[in-house]
Amino acid sequence: MLQKLFFSLAFCALSFGTFAQDAYLNAESEDTDKVYPGNAPYEVKMYPQKFKAEKPKNIIFLIGDGMGVSQVFAGITANQGHLFLDNFRHIGFSKTQSADNYITDSAAGGTALACGVRTYNGAIGVDTDTAKVKSILEEAEAKGLATGLVSTSAITHATPASFIAHQPSRNMYEAIAADFLNTDIDVFIGGGNDHFTKRKDGRNLANELKEKGYTVENDIDKIAKVKSGKLAGLTAEVHNGRTTERGDMLPVATTTALDILDNNDKGFFLMIEGSQIDWGGHASSTVYIVEDMLDFDQTIGKALEFAAKDGETLVLVTADHETGGMALTGGDMSTGRVKADYPTTGHTAVMVPVFAYGPGAEEFMGIMKNTDIHDKMKKLLLSK
């Protein structure tokens, strides 16, 4: 317990003297950023609701970091009435509290979803006594399924790290990167190249990944051409930029991961994070939130396209927590204009939505704890 307390206090201290990797926590926005002026909408396709089996062969788990109901409806408004989320008929809510706080951080929230335990804020894949807890990704891997992680943040950041690493503090980026070498994950795409290659211990994990048989690429266009084998796509030194900089990196990375994982006849587990909805909330920026909400929704569209064609894939969409307390104070569905205000630049404690499509989707209705999502996924995918 003393070790847990030390790391918990260290995490709190680091939150005030934020690491360069987490500079978004100190982001500020002008008042003009609180109004998204609207843009041309993209087309939303509706997919059939008939599936081949009662239980899924595959799970695509999408986490919109910081995405509450207001963020979702901001996206609906911005796209003039419709999102790919319209396809989801089974909807619930998740209570996000951590073991030591009414308001969770992304590490404890991610660990609850990945490992099925509530832990202290700042913990990555460990319980309140800092003991390692297996994630659903690791359990899927142990049963011979293919596995993958995709994120617009560094792949070593709190949410993706919770599915593959076991460290007492989320700020241990280099230790988290080294944990990737302890697994046989098939594909991971996100930022964080520096944590693999510019390390204090002198190791070059990119070279070690190549020795383990991975194709290691930094350019998203080259990453998109990989269709099989093991892939490590490290698309930024630390975090990827905003949508104006990274373009369609997340939808492209998602399609690439699905192409690779679908080669495994036993099935797969894939977690995809839209990280920067959260960062827009920290910045009190409606523009930032909407841009990343729409990018995340188009990524959901890629997952639904695969699942509808496959017929054996469960698509789940939720958040680890809400950020900013986003209050929609104005908008226009015909132009896509969204206006919002924010009582905080931190996380909030409100429930977040859970959307499910595919075999087993009916399990995810009603009010549940974040750990229940893990338990339901594990039951559906791994207890066969």
Image (tube, grey):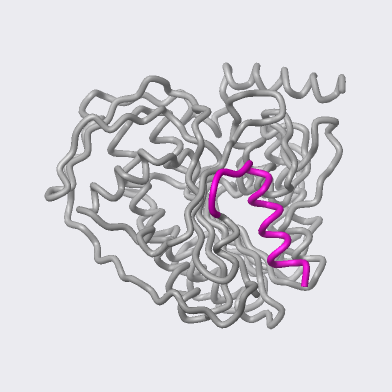
In this rendered view, identify the residue nearer to me: 309 or 124: 309
> Does the segment drawn in magenta span residue 367?
yes
* Residue extending furthest toward the left: 334
Q: What predominant SS class does the magenta segment belong to?
A: helix
Left or right of 162 in this view: 331: left
Q: Position of residue 273 (x, y in %)?
A: 52, 51
* Residue 28 higher or lower than 131, as above or below: above
Which residue corresponds to the image point at 36% horizontal and 38% vertical from the top-left?
70
Quadrant assignment for the N terminus: top right
Which residue corresponds to the image point at 48% horizontal and 70% vertical from the top-left?
255
Range covered by the magenta-colored residues: 365-384
Q: Position of residue 353 (x, y in %)?
A: 48, 46
Which residue corresponds to the image point at 17% horizontal and 42% vertical from the top-left?
337
In this rendered view, identify the residue nearer to me: 365 or 70: 365
Which residue corresponds to the image point at 27% horizontal and 30% vertical from the top-left?
340
* Residue 119 higher or lower than 245, as above or below: above
Q: Position of residue 276 (x, y in %)?
A: 44, 42
* Residue 141 higher or lower than 343, as above or below: below
* Residue 131 higher or lower than 295, as above or below: above
Quadrant assignment for the C terminus: bottom right
Quadrant of residue 97 in the image? top right
* Number of residue marks: 0
Q: Position of residue 316 (x, y in %)?
A: 54, 59
Left or right of 159 in this view: 70: left
> Does the segment drawn in magenta span residue 157?
no
Left or right of 319 in this view: 369: right
